């Protein structure tokens, strides 16, 4: 993580935090440790296996994990001050639906933090990982797991523009 991003996160008062596509909860734990503070955090993921892993490694205060789809969040409108999605948009069948849900549950004046691997503008030294990731995505799809090629910068911004 870049020092600039760490400094920016340290300025954020997280309030009630939602992490959509939390997986094993690693990104949520990293971000919560960097925020200046937070009241409570919830990590959601449709995978029971991932949520079980997240719960098994849970060490932070006021953090829970729930099995739930990001396309149909079981929360009222304007519930969270901070909504996070890390490295999960390229795993989603319907990322636009998830982004609409993120916006719906965000309180006015809140912030949405999206971190996503992009497929263009990468240094040559990272290309082998990029190709390996796409190969893993193809294997996942053959097994019926939702996982697609990573987005280009333009594709990511096109999707994120739905949040405005």
Image (cartoon, helix red, strand yellow):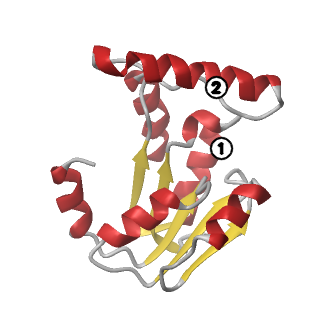
Question: Along the horizontal axis of the image, is 158 left or right of 53?
Answer: left
Callout 1: SS = helix
Figure check: 65 above or below 112:
below
Residue position marked by numbered label 1 in the rendering: 97
Structural crowding at the residue carrying mark 1, measured as other residues with C-alpha within 10 Å and reported as few (<14), some (14–19) or many (≥20): some
- 69 and 35: which is toward the camera: 35
Residue 147, x across and y down, in percent: 67, 31
Figure check: 74 above or below 118:
below
Figure check: 134 above or below 67:
above
Residue position marked by numbered label 2 in the rendering: 136
Residue 88, x across and y down, in percent: 56, 43
Spatial separation of the CA atoms under disc 1 and disc 2: 24 Å
Residue 99, x across and y down, in percent: 56, 47
Residue 82, x across and y down, in percent: 43, 67
- 69 and 162: which is toward the camera: 69
Residue depicted at x 83% and y 29%:
143
Figure check: 31 above or below 46:
below
Residue depicted at x 57% and y 75%:
58
- Residue mark closest to the camera, 1 vs 2: 2
């Amino acid at each position: 993580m870049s020092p600039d991003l760490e400094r920016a996160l340290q300025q954020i008062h997280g309030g009630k935090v939602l992490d959509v596509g939390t997986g094993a909860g690693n990104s949520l734990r990293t971000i919560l440790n960097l925020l200046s503070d937070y009241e409570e955090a919830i990590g959601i993921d449709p995978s029971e296996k991932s949520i079980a892993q997240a719960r098994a490694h849970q060490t932070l205060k006021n953090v829970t994990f729930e099995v739930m789809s990001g396309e149909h969040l079981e929360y009222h409108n304007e519930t969270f001050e901070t909504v996070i999605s890390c490295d999960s948009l390229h795993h989603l069948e319907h990322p636009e639906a998830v982004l609409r849900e993120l916006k719906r549950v965000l309180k006015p004046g809140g912030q949405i933090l999206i971190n996503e691997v992009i497929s263009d503008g990468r240094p040559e030294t990272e290309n082998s990982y990029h190709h390996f990731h796409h190969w893993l995505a193809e294997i996942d799809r053959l097994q019926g797991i939702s996982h697609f090629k990573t987005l280009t910068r333009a594709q990511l911004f096109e999707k994120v523009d739905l949040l405005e």
